[in-house]
Amino acid sequence: MQGIMTFALVLLLLITYSSSAETRDGNFLLRACEVAVNVDTKATESEAVNAGYCYGLVTGVLGTNRVNMTAFGNALFCTPAVGFPTSQGASVVVNYLNENPGKLYLGAVSLAILAFRKAYPCK
């Protein structure tokens, strides 16, 4: 029963958090995170904003997962450490999106979660 409650709470948090983020699809997320991963001092203002979107989304997904693990002992995915770098998270997302182009129509938050679940499944 506690597992169902935890899942419901995480789902509620993600829906609340992602209501605006899910208006962005995988195509946008891939472009944004590619810019973030390939940091370039010559990036345009728009590219820099998009890189910030990627880092913010990755930070939000990682943070939500960490809160769920800490508060309820149930994580959606299990990254190697608490100090998991956001830049590495952006790389995880880019790799997943490049390997799964058929899913780019999905929302950005959902895709980030799927990327982390594939890269860092809980045992």
Image (cartoon, rainbow, N blue to C red):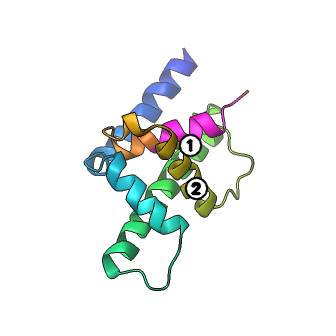
Looking at the rendered structure, the kind of residue marked 1 is Asn
Quadrant where the N terminus is found in the figure: top right
Q: Residue at x 25, y 48 (%)?
A: 23
Predominant secondary structure, magenta span: helix
The dot on residue 54 is none
Picture coordinates of residue 123, whole percent (x, y): 73, 27
Query: Given contact means CB atoms under 8 Å apart, are the residues at marks 2 and 1 in contact?
Result: no
Q: Residues within 10 Å of mark 1 (few under 14, many from 20)?
A: many
Given residues 32 and 75, the one toward you in this image is 32
Residue type beneath disc 2: Ser
Mark 2 packing: few (<14 Cα in 10 Å), some, or many (20+)? some
Q: Which residue is mark 2?
A: 91
Left or right: where 47 falls relative to 72: left
Q: Position of residue 118 (x, y in %)?
A: 60, 34
Q: How far from the left and from the top, in percent, is residue 29?
A: 39, 54
**Residue 83 image-quadrant placement:** bottom right
Question: What kind of element bears circle 1?
Answer: helix
For mark 1, what is the residue?
65
3D distance between C-alphas at marks 2 and 1: 18 Å
Left/right placement of residue 41 relative to residue 122 reads left
Residue drawn where x is 68% and y is 44% of the image: 79
* Viewer-nearest residue: 4 or 110: 110
- Measuring 49% from the left and 26% from the top, which residue is drawn there? 7
Most foreground residue, 15 or 44? 44
Q: Any magenta on residue 79?
A: no
**Which residues are the magenta region?**
112-122
Q: Is residue 95 above or below residue 102?
A: below
Magenta highlight on residue 119: yes
> Does any portion of residue 68 appear in the rendered image?
no
Is disc 2 placed on a helix, strand or loop? helix
